[in-house]
Amino acid sequence: MTRENITTADGGTLELFTTGGELANGGSGVVVVPASMVTAADYSKFAQKLSAALRRPVHTFNRRGRGESSPQPEDYTLDVDIRDLSEVMKHTASTDVFGHSFGGAVALHAARTLPVERLAVYDPAVSVNHSVKADWTGEYERATAAGDFDRGLAVLVKGVETEGAFARMPLSMLTLVTKLTSGTPMGKQMRELMQAGVREIKQSSPRTCPQSLSLSCRWRRSLWSGKRAPPTSVWRVARSTTSCPDRATPSCPATAMMV
């Protein structure tokens, strides 16, 4: 794996990691857009396995506010990440993109304007038929601003509803649980990224995120959903992402599968 810093058009810095750089002749590289509350380092093993499987380079970068990348601007919007993704794609001559969670939201929106040839997202942070609730984000922001990171993380866990039984705990009990993680590497990292997380969560909420995620009909979509996901989730995503406003027909070619 190699590491370098690239300079953006606005004078910012993006820390970029490349795995499998020697495989550049194998085709376009894949740019990985990380989630919120994590860094590029958390995708090291994923990048290694993906590069080995595809026999192509995989490029992972620290979004702003992480590692040696520039701080996140106070007036941050999703467009900042879209422009940065464009810079990374140009620098690495890559046309394929993978986005995870909030990075998936960035990738989906970016694909409408950037020259993305192939796109894969896992658990993208987008609201499908109002599936993302925003009523908890105010409390998360207030707790973070007050430096009460234990409570802030507890509000986050309950709000995103991704931690199973933990998300069903009373907030007071969950706050005690998150306090126990404060000394762990992951707990420290999440607390360091909570200010950036506030801005990103605002951008992924239905109040600020564009409602339509219709993508060009030039793509054929394959939509997968896990067996433990809500049974209608994959079909809701299919209806949301395959609409074609520029055509009379209501859908583009797509397949949907439960796995």
Image (cartoon, helix red, strand yellow):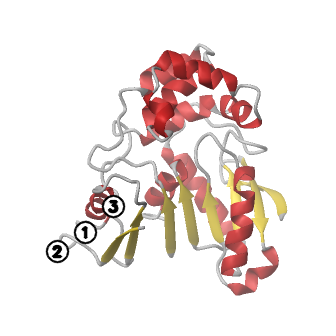
Whether residue 116 is visible, yes or no, is no
Q: What kind of residue is marked 1?
A: Cys
Label 2 to label 1: alpha-carbon separation: 7 Å
> Which residue is at the front of the view, 246 or 134?
134
Q: Which residue is mark 2?
A: 249
The crowd level at tag 2 (other Cα within 10 Å; few <14, some 14-19, many 20+) is: few
User: In the image, residue 137 lies at what x, y percent?
Assistant: 44, 27
Q: In the rendered image, which residue does mark 1 sit on?
A: 244
The residue type indicated by label 2 comes to Thr
Image label count: 3
Q: Position of residue 159 (x, y in %)?
A: 43, 32
Amino acid type at mark 3 = Val
Say whether disc 3 or disc 2 marks the residue closer to the N-terminus.
Answer: 3
Element carrying mark 1: loop
In the rendered view, would you say 3 is above or below 166?
Answer: below
Q: Which mark is residue 234?
A: 3
Location of residue 234 (image quadrant): bottom left
Give the mark nearest the N terminus, 3 or 1: 3
- What residue is drawn where x is 71% and y is 25%? 182
